[in-house]
Image (tube, rainbow, N blue to C red):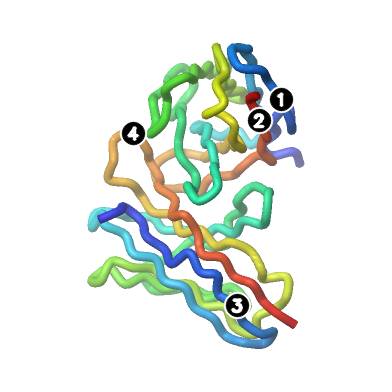
């Protein structure tokens, strides 16, 4: 019963490097989300995908791109990492969007030096 | 006014105490409300949904007050294991985020 799986768990990047954070869910959920969480800031939405084939910007999309590869997978890409992107990243899924609760992955702890 | 506001705490309470948190929201059209629990350096986990009539799950009771636009979480007979940050979540009035999270209230239950 995996739920939402994120990889990697930890990553250290140098400024300017690129990487992709992977997220997969096995609950047949329609909607998927990427959040970042910084101390004292709470969870902030980066991008979301209401359904397969659609993606939308959240509150803090700059510096990120996403791909909803299929219903199960939603990846987040940092094209040129910056120290300001040092954060904990959480992927989440939601069964039918709108008003149902979110289910989170374990998170990816990213440090950009 | 922020969309969702919570007292950050910390609330330091002894074991066995009853503690309550409130969360105010600005979107009068919000239809869905949740309480999440987040342990240090872990992912948020759904604690309970909040229904219009109020609902209870063991030692936890959630209430919704639409007139005053707040939700509450009551924890009875606090356990050491209840120590965590409690996040309030409501439907957003912003077009670019379906749900909005409060910054959380930190609870520390002390032996």
Residue receiving disc 4: B96
Q: Are marks 3 and 1 on the same chain?
A: no
Q: CA–CA distance between discs 3 and 1?
A: 35 Å
Determine which of the numbered discs, if any, sits on residue A41 in the image.
none
Q: CA–CA distance between discs 3 and 2?
A: 31 Å
Determine which of the numbered discs, if any, sits on residue B12 in the image.
3
Identify which residue is drawn at 47% across, 47% down.
A41
For label 1, the SS is: strand
Left or right of residue B39: residue B53? left
Mark 1 — on which chain does it sit? A
Q: In this view, does B44 lie above or below B57?
A: above
Q: Residues within 10 Å of mark 4 (few under 14, many from 20)?
A: some
Identify which residue is drawn at 44% across, 50% down.
B101
Quarter of the view holding residue B64: bottom left
For label 2, the SS is: strand
Q: Do labels 1 and 4 share a chain?
A: no
Q: How crowded is mark 3: few (under 14 residues within 10 Å), some or many (20 or more)?
A: few
The quarter of the rendered structure image containing the C terminus of chain A is top right
For label 4, the SS is: loop
Q: Position of residue A98 (x, y in %)?
A: 39, 42
Nearer to us of marks 1 and 4 is 1
Residue receiving disc 1: A12
Nearer to us of marks 3 and 4 is 3
Q: How crowded is mark 2: few (under 14 residues within 10 Å), some or many (20 or more)?
A: some
Q: CA–CA distance between discs 1 and 4?
A: 29 Å
Residue receiving disc 2: A110
Q: CA–CA distance between discs 2 and 1?
A: 6 Å
């Amino acid at each position: 019963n995996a739920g939402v799986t994120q990889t990697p768990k930890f990553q250290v990047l140098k400024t300017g490097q690129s990487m992709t954070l992977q997220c997969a869910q096995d609950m047949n959920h329609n909607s998927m989300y990427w959040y970042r969480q910084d101390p004292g800031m709470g969870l902030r939405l980066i991008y979301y995908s209401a359904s397969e084939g659609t993606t939308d910007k959240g509150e803090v999309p700059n510096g990120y791109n996403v791909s909803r590869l299929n219903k199960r997978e939603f990846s987040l890409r940092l094209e040129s990492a910056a120290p300001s992107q040092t954060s904990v990243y959480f992927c989440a899924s939601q069964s039918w969007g709108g008003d149902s609760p979110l289910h989170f992955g374990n998170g990816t702890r990213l440090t950009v030096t | 006014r922020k969309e969702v506001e919570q007292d950050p705490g910390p609330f330091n309470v002894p074991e066995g105490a009853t503690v309550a948190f409130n969360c105010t929201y600005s979107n009068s059209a919000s239809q869905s409300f949740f309480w999440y629990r987040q342990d240090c350096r872990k992912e948020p986990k759904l604690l309970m949904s909040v229904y219009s009539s109020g609902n209870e799950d063991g030692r936890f009771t959630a209430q919704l007050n639409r007139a005053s636009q707040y939700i509450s979480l009551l924890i009875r007979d606090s356990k050491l294991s209840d120590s965590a940050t409690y996040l309030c979540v409501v439907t957003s009035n912003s077009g670019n985020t379906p749900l909005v999270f409060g910054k959380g209230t930190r609870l520390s239950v002390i032996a």
